[in-house]
Amino acid sequence: MDSTITWSLGSTDPESEANLIRISQWWESLAGQEILWQQRPLTEATGSVAIDWSKQILDETFIIQSPSLRGITIYWIKPNSTEERNISVGYFQLNLFNQQLDILPSSGRSYQLRITLPKIVYQKIQLTNPQFGSVTQANGDSIILFRDEKQRLEVQVDLSAENISTLKQKLSN
């Protein structure tokens, strides 16, 4: 499963619209959560790859309210404010593993934003009555394979003999 989703204004990538929808869903899921908002200058010498994203004094941590994406513009409200803020976007890169959204504004300004969910978030996959099978190896370890035809998803779980024993105990309770 790819953990990086990219969208760029004017892209001809056939996945562009689907990527924007997934980014929008992530952005809107931040409602009521604490985020880290960072802004860094871009220069021709450094580019976006060399940006120092370590915590700096002007970085903000706040509970975001009403995040939404309308067209190519993100909207949000900061705590203790009634004013809706917005930025039109030229480029998004969402890293699901690190729960970070990098944004380049469409205005051509020379800065980049990073919005991070500063807590660990596990990606959840739900399989309902999947096909499954297992193989036990000579050393007692096992491989369990789950397949969901509807989602075209296959999950392989490698378990030590110790974990197999624990799993059996938990399933029998």
Image: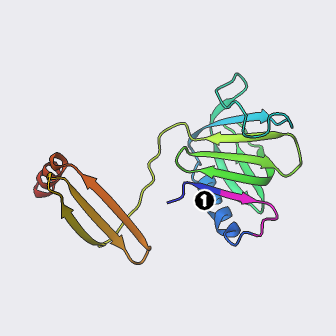
Residue 157 belongs to the span the image colors magenta? no
- Secondary structure, mark 1, is helix
Q: Nearer the viewer, residue 165 or 113?
A: 165
x then y, percent, for residue 141: 19, 53
Q: How many marks?
A: 1
Q: Nearer the viewer, residue 146 or 69?
A: 146
Left-right relation of 110 to 137: right
Three-letter code for the amino acid on which mark 1 is drawn: Gln
Q: Residue at x 78, y 65 (%)?
A: 11
Question: Looking at the image, which residue is at 44% across and 73% down?
Answer: 151
Q: Is residue 42 visible?
A: yes
Q: Position of residue 34 (x, y in %)?
A: 57, 38
Placement of the C terminus among the 4 image quadrants: bottom left
Task: Report the residue that reaches farthest toward the right.
Answer: 108
Read off the magenta span.
6-12
Q: Is 144 placed left or right of 68 in the picture?
A: left
Q: Residue furthest bottom?
A: 150
- How is the rendered protein coloured? rainbow
Q: State yes or no: residue 9 in magenta.
A: yes
Reading the image, the residue beneath label 1 is 25
Q: Position of residue 39 (x, y in %)?
A: 75, 35
Position of 76 relative to 73 (above/below): above
